[in-house]
Amino acid sequence: MKVLAPLFGYLIGSIAIGVPIAFALLFASVATGMHMGGSSGNPQIMAAQLLRGTDSVAMMALPFFILTGELMNRGGLTHRIIALASATVGRVRGGLGYVAILSALLFGSLVGSAVASTAALGAILIPMMVKDGYNRERSAALIASSNLVSPIMPPSVPLIIYGAAAGVSIKSLFLAGVAPALYLTIVMFIVWYFIARSKENIRSEIPRVGARGLAKLAYQAIWALLLPVIILFGLRSGVFTATEAGVVSVVYALIIGVFVYREINVKEAFAALRSAAKVSAVVMFLAAAAQVAAYYMAISGVPAVLTRSLGGLVDNPTLLMIVLLMFIILLGLVLDVVPTILIVTPIVLPLLNAAGIDLIYFGIVFTLANVIGLNTPPVGPSLNVAAAVGNVKVGAIIRPTLPYLLAQTALVIVMALIPELILTPLGWLDPK
């Protein structure tokens, strides 16, 4: 227990002075090992834990799905999804807002990253909305909020990270994420409905598309939209594992981008590989550093301390979930999704097991609570990206983001209180 102070002291101090989180975790771990003395500071132990952090079949799926997102993003998918969404919901009052929400759901099922989908969709939709008379700040806020569905809808990078950290099935996590993603989309539709009626009381100038035109747009987009269907069907039927699904998705994305849409050439393919390699390396290194920190947290008794502190709540799993949820939401204000998952998961696992809380259900609620932090200052990655592509100041879109943020937070709390909202649809998709 004496090592808790230096461990967290070094970690918080390093982050406070701007050290990247992965290096801060390593620095805190090395300092803690030296402070403990004996074999704890053995470099071989640290090296072994570093390797263990990425030595996982589940983690192998990560670079493949990241590469799939890169290929789809470069393969002409974005404007095809927007065109299809515009043809279906674009002409109603506040129609472009509904287009943004629907596009976020469709695009998120291919990219799996809120920041990437915010950048891709925002660059196209925000200028369209402003041109049609929509308020620029509210448009950017809507784009940032709508794309919070991406890290939940499979294939989800945060769910892969959580699955590897918690040792649970990536397949089950992917299937469990479908219903919450739809809940988020419905909540966004409801909130936008009231905002559009009061503040965006306009009709879009999107040309009417007849049945033949709609069929053509659907045909153009269907090849890309088949990817999540193939992944979910393959996982549910047991045709392939989550890692194999990643390989299948890369091959499919290449075929669609090269031979169907014909927008991926050799240059674009290498650019996608380079970008995916950089992102994968960052996440993998962070996972390795987090494993070293988790090792020292374990031997210093952090999980045991947490279990003793909250042990009185073990007999009341619902109350325990609410306490953990509030803690995670507060942590998400200052940390990004992946670091939070990697740091917190090993600490709370003993407590969750003692309380008998389903780890799949917790993983979905945990990830959703983390995702909310993407739109909250002072970090707010999605908020910053939406402001950048929308050419507005971050401070100007915080207020119009609040209605969505409150509704999304309320939804997460409801799902924490009613596990059946997650587990019942999971039972339909993944019967045991």
Image: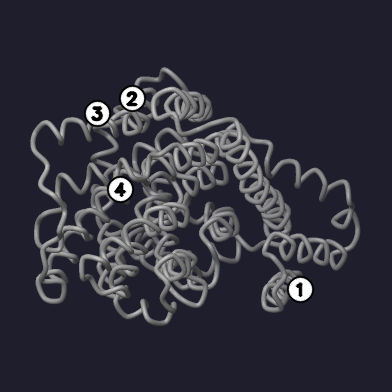
**SS at mark 3?**
helix
At horizontal 42% and vertical 50% (from top left) the residue drawn is 151
Q: Where is residue 222 in the image (x, y as percent from the top left)?
A: 28, 30
* In the foreground, 109 or 183: 109
State which tag comes first along the sequence, 1 or 2.
1
**SS at mark 1?**
helix
> Mark 3 and mark 4: span between their CA atoms?
18 Å
The residue that disc 1 covers is 6
State which tag comes first along the sequence, 1 or 4.
1
Task: Please identify, in this view, whether the residue under mark 1 or under mark 3 is nearer the observer.
Answer: 3
At horizontal 40% and vertical 39% (from top left) the residue drawn is 76
Tell me if residue 268 comes above or below residue 309 in the rendering: above
The residue that disc 3 covers is 219
State which tag comes first along the sequence, 4 or 2.
4
Q: Where is residue 302 in the image (x, y as percent from the top left)?
A: 64, 63
Task: Please identify, in this view, whether the residue under mark 1 or under mark 2 is nearer the observer.
Answer: 2
Q: Quadrant of the rendered structure where residue 61 is? A: top right
Is residue 187 in sight in this rendering? no
Task: Please identify, in this view, whether the residue under mark 2 or under mark 3 is nearer the observer.
Answer: 3
88 left or right, relative to 361: left
Q: Position of residue 262 (x, y in %)?
A: 44, 29
193 left or right, relative to 26: left
The residue that disc 2 covers is 233
State which tag comes first along the sequence, 1 or 3.
1
Amino acid at pointer 2: Phe
The residue that disc 4 covers is 105
